[in-house]
Amino acid sequence: MIDIHCHILDEVDDGPQSLDESIELCRKLKDAGITGIVATPHFIDGGGYMPTPQLIRSKVGNLKKVLKEKDIDINIYSGMEVFADYNTIERVKNNDILTLNDSRYILIEFAMDIVPKYASSLIFSLLVEGYVPIIAHPERYTAEYRKSGVLKDLVYNGALVQINSGSILGDHGKRAQKEALTLINEEMVHLVSSDSHGAHRLLDNKDNLEVKLIKFCGLENTQRLMYTNPLMVLENKDIEYLTKVKKSFFLLEIVKNIRYSS
């Protein structure tokens, strides 16, 4: 499994604060079954986290060197998690922002508590420029995104959706879990990633995630979410879309979640 959303680099954001922490996180993710990681430190224009592409590439190169010395067999690639704002498209054009492994795929995070008015225009602009925006963990956003229909419109117009493994497993609470499963049921999810921040949100066993997903959406969809599509992003190829989830699977999982939370 390739993790396309992971805060693995030291001293660039709210992820690991030392190289030793980065190494330990890589070790744990490898033990969990991860074979490759796209390093996606936050890029928040004017918000304190603004690592340059040069810094990220340097950090990735150093981490790869140390991992090889320590015989930790896991691949690291460059990227960013870009907090969307009015300047994002200009930042992209100025090469201030890294895509995922230098592909056409770019990881975009929106404000969680409000639906920004510029969301649709930003996604459209990125698509026109030849990029494919991947919206990070929208299952954790406010319910207003669903009520407004903006997320559905963004996906319909060409954006992709990444949800967190922790949301599926219930680590972010029942609301996020239910929303993640609902998005899968509506065929609006394309990738699953850890969004690990050091030991925080760590995916400690990908097999648990795989079993959960297979029970909910079947083997074929699980393969696409966990394996096929992350690899396609890494290789700059077209992703595969989900097929319809069996209604019985969806209803059973939702009922179970309600029962366990009561």
Image: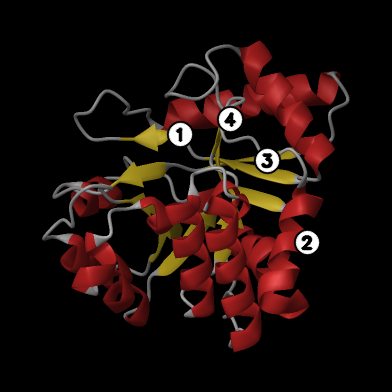
Q: CA distance from mark 2 to mark 3?
A: 14 Å
Color style of the picture: secondary structure
Which residue is at a point 30% across and 73% down the rendered structure image? 154
Point out the frontmost of discs 1 and 2: 2
**The disc label shown at residue 41, or none:** 1
Q: CA distance from mark 1 to mark 3?
A: 17 Å
Which residue is at a point 26% across and 52% down the rendered structure image? 93
Mark nearer the N terminus (2 vs 3): 3
Mark nearer the N terminus (1 vs 3): 1
Q: Are discs 1 and 3 less than 8 Å apart at CB?
A: no
Residue named by callout 2: 211
From the top left corner, tell me how far across and down residue 187 is, in percent: 50, 79
Crowdedness near tag 2: few (<14), some (14–19) or many (≥20) residues, C-alpha within 10 Å: few
Residue named by callout 3: 203
Residue named by callout 4: 8
Q: Are discs 4 and 1 less than 8 Å apart at CB?
A: no
Point out the frontmost of discs 2 and 3: 2
Mark nearer the N terminus (4 vs 2): 4
SS class of the residue under badge 3? loop
From the top left corner, tell me how far across and down residue 203 is, in percent: 68, 40
Evaluate whether residue 132 shows in this view. Answer: yes
Q: Quadrant of residue 153?
A: bottom left
Crowdedness near tag 1: few (<14), some (14–19) or many (≥20) residues, C-alpha within 10 Å: many
The N terminus, quarter of image: bottom right
Mark nearer the N terminus (1 vs 2): 1
Q: Amino acid at mark 3?
A: Leu
Specify whether 179 is left or right of 120: right
From the top left corner, tell me how far across and down residue 240 is, in percent: 61, 79
Q: Is residue 142 above or below residue 21?
A: below
Q: CA distance from mark 4 to mark 2?
A: 25 Å
Mark nearer the N terminus (4 vs 1): 4
Specify whether 42 is left or right of 182: left
